[in-house]
Image: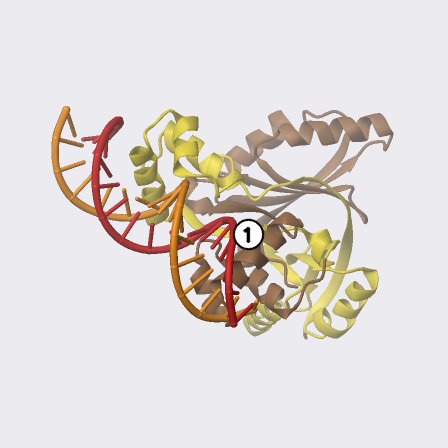
Chain colours: A yellow, B brown, C orange, D red
DNA sequence: CTTGAAAGGAGATATAA
DNA sequence: TTATATCTCCTTTCAAG
């Protein structure tokens, strides 16, 4: 679909805060309520906007300990890969898992309460998955930048 | 604040889809509209829910090329660190940047259109920041799991 | 916490410009 | 395509149990 400058600005605003009223977006864009209403519906319909979600403060729910875990599989036979990926889905501590190029096969983002919870997660959940070659954990010291918005 | 089982379930639902009506959440929890309304307001007031946002489909806006870039600084003197972190904020391609322990100092998540755009980003933006020691890019081959929700 | 009710406002629709 | 008006429904608040 064709995205013009107004769409771009609207999407940017919706990615920052989706709970404003249509009138507020309309004022920001200098368009009428109806025009903005139709644009939002079109962005939703065409799938540019995939969903609306609440974002939770990790500290407030005791999940302030974040870790990037780099995982390499022992052998890359299809069966092992599929099994690993299926097991990862089930682990609630894993917020993200990407298959990547480079030194490791997978990069995982994990949120737990503290180092002890992470140790427990590693021992009884992650490394319990068969065919994992090795793992390398990078603990998050500080969040320099953290947005769910994609700049377009 | 004290979070009970109902809060937990409600937060989970709101993290999956924040655009349902209060009645829908109420039905899912087996509570009245008023009770759910008050719980949501309390979660917002106390900061458990930090904000509501629209999520955008990267493919639909030509930002389907995702990269994890591991960055090491040349020297870790405070001035360099602060300067690097300030410059990173300005780069629209960088969605996330974490200061981490381990082999690298920082892990960045970057969204661009394609490999050519990434090359351009590296050459004229990222490595233009002084005091970067070295970088190591891991290209995302597939998203095994990707959620903004934190399981509580 | 529940039910019920009332008010205001925003979303959704239709019609006109 | 944009603005205006209308209608409907949801949010929000309150009272009483």
Q: Position of residue B113 (x, y in %)?
A: 48, 38
Q: Tell me which residue sits at (73%, 52%) in the image.
A: A59
Q: Tell me which residue sits at (32%, 29%) in the image.
A: A32
- Left or right: where D9 falls relative to C3: left
The residue at which mark 1 appears reads as: A54
Kindly identify which chain the residue marked by label 1 belongs to: A
Q: Position of residue B74 (x, y in %)?
A: 82, 32
Residue A15 visible in the shown view? yes
Answer above or below: position of A56 versus A83: above
- Left or right: where B76 falls relative to A91: right
Q: Position of residue B124 (x, y in %)?
A: 61, 25
Q: Position of residue B82 (x, y in %)?
A: 78, 29
Residue B144 visible in the shown view? no
Exactly how many numbered labels are in the figure? 1
Answer above or below: position of A88 versus A147: below
Q: Secondary structure at mark 1?
A: strand
Answer above or below: position of B56 versus B145: above
Q: Tell me which residue sits at (75%, 36%) in the image.
A: B134
């Amino acid at each position: 679909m064709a995205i013009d400058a107004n769409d771009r600005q609207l999407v940017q605003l919706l990615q920052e805060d989706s709970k404003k009223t249509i009138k507020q977006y309309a004022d920001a864009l200098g368009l009428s309520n109806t025009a903005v209403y139709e644009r939002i519906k079109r962005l939703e319909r065409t799938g540019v906007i995939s969903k609306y979600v609440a974002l939770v403060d990790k500290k407030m729910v005791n999940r302030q300990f974040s870790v990037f875990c780099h995982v390499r599989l022992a052998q890359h036979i299809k069966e092992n890969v599929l099994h690993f990926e299926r097991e990862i889905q089930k682990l609630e501590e894993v917020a993200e898992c990407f298959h990547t190029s480079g030194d490791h096969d997978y990069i995982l983002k994990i949120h737990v309460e503290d180092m002890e919870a992470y140790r427990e997660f590693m021992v009884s959940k992650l490394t319990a998955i068969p065919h994992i070659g090795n793992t390398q954990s990078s603990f998050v010291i500080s969040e320099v930048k953290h947005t769910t918005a994609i700049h377009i």
